[in-house]
Amino acid sequence: MANFEEREKGFERKFAHDEELKFRATARRNRLLGLWAAEQMGLTGDDAQAYAREVVKADLAEPGEEDVFRKIRADFDATGVGQSDHQIRRKMVETMGEAVGQIESEGKA
């Protein structure tokens, strides 16, 4: 019985750890995506950093990533940036890979 409880606690710790990594990766992805979007809109320096923070905050509006996509899509439309929905979504995937890679490399350091 003790073995079963130890295994159960181990699974719970792993689940909590995995969820934390997922949250960190998503937040990092959103920051990287925000910096990319800011660059597309001609924002630099503090303005770009502020925009990236806005993108991170936008992800808290609802579960999933559609809130982030809608924010960037609306901001691109408002500023005349010619990126398609497909290009934005592809960049979301690319920046998630980059975010995971950064977090993994930080864990090894």
Image (cartoon, grey):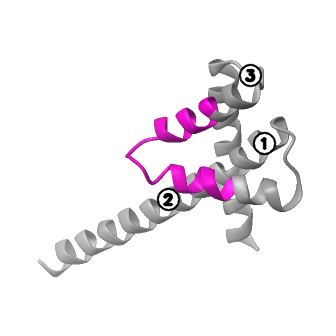
Q: Is residue 55 magenta?
A: yes
Q: Residue at x 38, y 67 (%)?
A: 16
Task: Answer above or below: position of 37 versus 77.
Answer: below
Residue 68's place in the image compared with 14, above or below, is above
In the image, what residue type sits under mark 3? Gln
- Most extreme residue toward the left is 1
Asked whether 75 or 91 is in front, the reply is: 75
Please provide percent x and percent y for residue 26: 56, 52
Q: Which residue position holds label 2?
A: 23
Kindly state the secondary structure of the residue where label 2 is placed. Answer: helix
Q: Characterize the magenta stretch by its predominant secondary structure.
A: helix
Determine the secondary structure under disc 1: helix
Residue drawn where x is 63% and y is 50% of the image: 30
Q: Residue at 64%, 44% (x, y): give it.
A: 96
Say if residue 19 shows up in the picture: yes
Residue that carries the numbered disc 3 in the rendered image: 83
Q: Nearer the viewer, residue 64 or 98?
A: 64
Residue closest to the eye, 40 or 80: 80
| 82 up-or-down from 95: above or below | above
Q: Quadrant of the N terminus?
A: bottom left
User: Is residue 64 toward the left or the right of residue 90 in the image?
Assistant: left
Q: CA distance from mark 1 to mark 2?
A: 20 Å
Circle 1 sits on which residue? Answer: 36
Q: Is residue 98 visible?
A: no
Residue at x-position 67% and y-position 70% = 107
Q: Is residue 87 magenta?
A: no
Residue span colored magenta = 52-74
| Image marks 3 and 2: residues in contact by CB distance under 8 Å | no
Q: CA distance from mark 3 to mark 2?
A: 27 Å
Q: Earlier in the sequence, mark 1 or mark 2?
A: 2
Labels 1 & 3 near each other (Cβ < 8 A):
no
The amino acid beneath tag 2 is: Phe
